Amino acid sequence: MAVKKDYKDQVLVEKLRDRKYYIPDSNPEFIKEVEKIGLTPAHMCYQCGTCTGSCPSAPRSSYRIRLFMRKAILGLEDEILTDPDLWLCTTCYSCTDRCPRDLAPTDVIMAMRNLAARRDIVPRNFLKTTQLIYNTGHGVPNNDANRAARLKLGLEADPETTHKYPEFLVGIRKLLDHYGLKEKADRILAEGE
Amino acid sequence: MAELKKKEEPKIGVFVCHCGTNIAGSIDIKAVMEYAKTLPNVAIADDYQYMCSTPGQNKVVEAIEEHKLTGVVVAACSPRLHEPTFRGATKLGGLNPFRFEMANIREQNSWVHMHQPEEATEKAKDAVRIAVAKASLLEDLIPKSVPVEQAAMVVGGGVGGMQAALDLANAGIKTYLIEKEPSIGGRMSQLDKTFPTLDCSQCILTPKMVDVARNENIELLTYTEVEAVEGYIGNFDVTLRKKARGVLTTEEAEARGFVGGGCNGCGDCEDVCPVIRPNPFELGMAPMKAIYVYHPQVSPLLYTIDFDSCVKCNLCVDICGDKKAIDLNAVDEFETVKVGSIILATGYDIFPIEEKHEWGYKNYDNVITSLEFERLICASGPTGGHLIRPSDGAVPKKIAFVLCAGSRDNTGVGKPYCSRFCCMYSLKHAHQIIEKIPGAVPYIFYMDIRSFGKMYEEFYYRIQDEGAKFIRGRVANILEDPVTKNLHVNAEDTLLGRPIDMEVDMVVLAAAVQPSAQTEATRRLFGVSCSQDGWLLEAHPKLNPCGTTTAGVYLAGVCQGPKDIPDTVAQAEGAASAASIPIHRGEVELEPYFAVCLEDICAGCGMCINLCPYQALSLIEKDGRTVMHVTEAKCKGCGTCGGFCPGGAIWMQHFTTPQIVAQIDAFLLGGEQ
């Protein structure tokens, strides 16, 4: 276990925090759980970096998919699930296409997001997107600027989606309700206010 | 034959091996032993820590004498491992060695049922019961000896095949060296330098090529392929296809009456030939005529006509004049030779790395393979040793080397294995560009540098010291700048944890290797197995790396798996030594598992003759009757005829019908006879 020392001063306590990896701090079951949800043998990763090298998110952010794979194998569950970077994957699947070990790193990330969501750890923008889908059927709903642009191009103001046929929203809501997603999003957002 | 013999009372000894904890860890040895004592015909049952050890074997020897045993059963590992050991012990005890039967309770039991001890123990009892049932019916068998043809064959004229042929020839054995290309030399002759000593590849290879050509015990057959193989260890009949070369050697010309004629390698024909096509030796980077030699150091120095592109304009015939070396009407010729043992050294090809689209080979001009790099940096290559960019002929300054290109790849497009020599030759390439191009910087993208051999790690140290840059990360993709034709190499520096976009002038892909194109067809001709990845399968990965499961056929070099030049030469010497053993002994013992015709019962119907996959059966006249006859040396004991014979007149020695029926009964009846 990480050694804890009380330096009286909180700034100093954080600055000199024991950062070593200790086996008791990790959860060996975590990788198994991730593999069960992600359906890919993530423990076979050999850390070549093809995933991060392929990642469109990596050059513009601190998101490192290879590091997430590594941490998952080491069982650093808390560190992963509380890391805001977990939500920076765009799910483009470039890493999955190129992984020489034929793994699906994208699905590993998705599995870990599932596990984070079970613990109510979800960024607010994702929760708001859930609400938007529930209310409009779109993660990014149509707006006035878009409508004007569409009309200018000779299109109808609203596309052939729930925007035009709001009666289909019922089905979408049924799906989200089945998994309690909207309810969860509402609750977490309210708690954060 | 059993029924002709006086029935003896079977007395079987059963010995159960612990194999340390390999077997005893999951099987209750005492329970199996006690069970064995209750079986019919068992005179003694015993166990020991390691049955294969001297005290273990002595138990067998002593029990045979003490209990007057007629058969021995050892329950231990796979017969592949220790059947010969216990046959030896059985013989030492005074019994015929074929009175021994093995029950495999390790590979087929304790190892696979590690976590089910109770079921494993029950299965071991079954195995012992079945073995005892067979042992009770075993007969004395006498192995047959056949003489060995005093000649050997090596297929493949690369450095491995050449070394094997030289060793065999120098040991006094007549050796046929078969090469499908017009010249020997193989892949090594395409290389510029060799790691870690930086010897010039051609300089150390050509003396060997000359030795091969001059050795009076070697019959060098280039531009020749194996057409058919028949026979068995000691007596192979190999039919060779001598492809139509269109050019006569001095000897061939003399045989046609043109004394003093034949090809002298002057090259006049090449000058006049109007057909130009890519030279495969230079990987298509240099032109070649329809009448050609690949490069100046070929051995034999003899031109070859490519009849696929030759237009038969006769210009070469005219210029050749009185030498009369060219025959445009040549056709393939066939020759059958007899040899006692055979070495396969069929080598490798480069994996078609364009299949990994993300690296853009064959799409981007300045992405080349390592073998192309070898030709470009080689003084005798198409550019005279000046490394240039294919797109514009400029000298590249920043060169990226992509390691594990298609190796260690489980996607299905690529090879799961490590190609083993790419790390080292890429280090050598880095050295070569630093040496030849002032200001050039090699960037080596690697996952692990595998510098495993003697002086290899020191070579790695040296190249790092010379200024090569190492980036630990596999290349994700390569993009081409459409204007400059420079390449952007995208990867992650995994040690830095940061993505990289590196603009370089040229990219060299250290492409994976794979078995050469004809390996599959060749191995089928010789009846040799291959592993999952297509490399030819050795008899045992550790204890018999040069042998195959086909007696008399041996392996040398990369055809058995990726290996560098020192390892190839070492294996070739090992294979030559192994292949010379049967020849020097003069005769080989064949396992006596052949079919026997019970002539009293045989109706001479001849149905079995065509079923035999080895042409071992024939019909003969004997005492006024037609009966089947087995050529024992050809019979492999497969049992096809024995299983079919409608009259039950074929007796498969060591696998007789009564023996097999007894085994089945023992299994199905659970010991209640």
Image: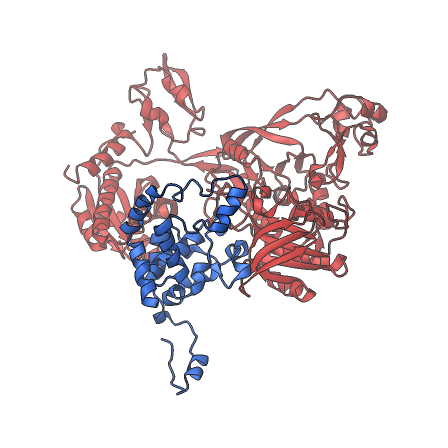
Chain colours: A blue, B red
Give the quarter of the image for residue A59.
bottom right
Give the quarter of the image for residue B23.
bottom left
Q: Residue drawn 37% across and 65% down?
A: A77
Give the quarter of the image for residue B246.
top right
Task: Judge from the rendering whether residue B483 lies leftward or rightward of residue A187; answer left or right.
Answer: right
* Residue B531, percent from left and from top: 47, 42
* Residue B195, percent from left and from top: 66, 56
**B579 lies above or below B644:** below
Visible residue check, residue B546:
no
* Residue at the extreme bottom of the image, as rendered: A8
Task: Judge from the rendering whether residue B642 lies leftward or rightward of residue B169; answer left or right.
Answer: left
Quadrant location of the C terminus of chain B in the rendered image: top left
Front residue of B216/B127: it is B127
* Residue B545, percent from left and from top: 50, 47
* Residue B628, percent from left and from top: 38, 19
* Residue at the extreme top of the image, as rendered: B624
Label tally: 0
Front residue of B640/B619: it is B640
Quadrant location of the N terminus of chain B in the rendered image: top left
Visible residue check, residue B330:
yes
**B32 lies above or below B161:** below
Task: Judge from the rendering whether residue B38 lies leftward or rightward of residue B307; answer left or right.
Answer: left
* Residue at the extreme left of the image, as rendered: B672
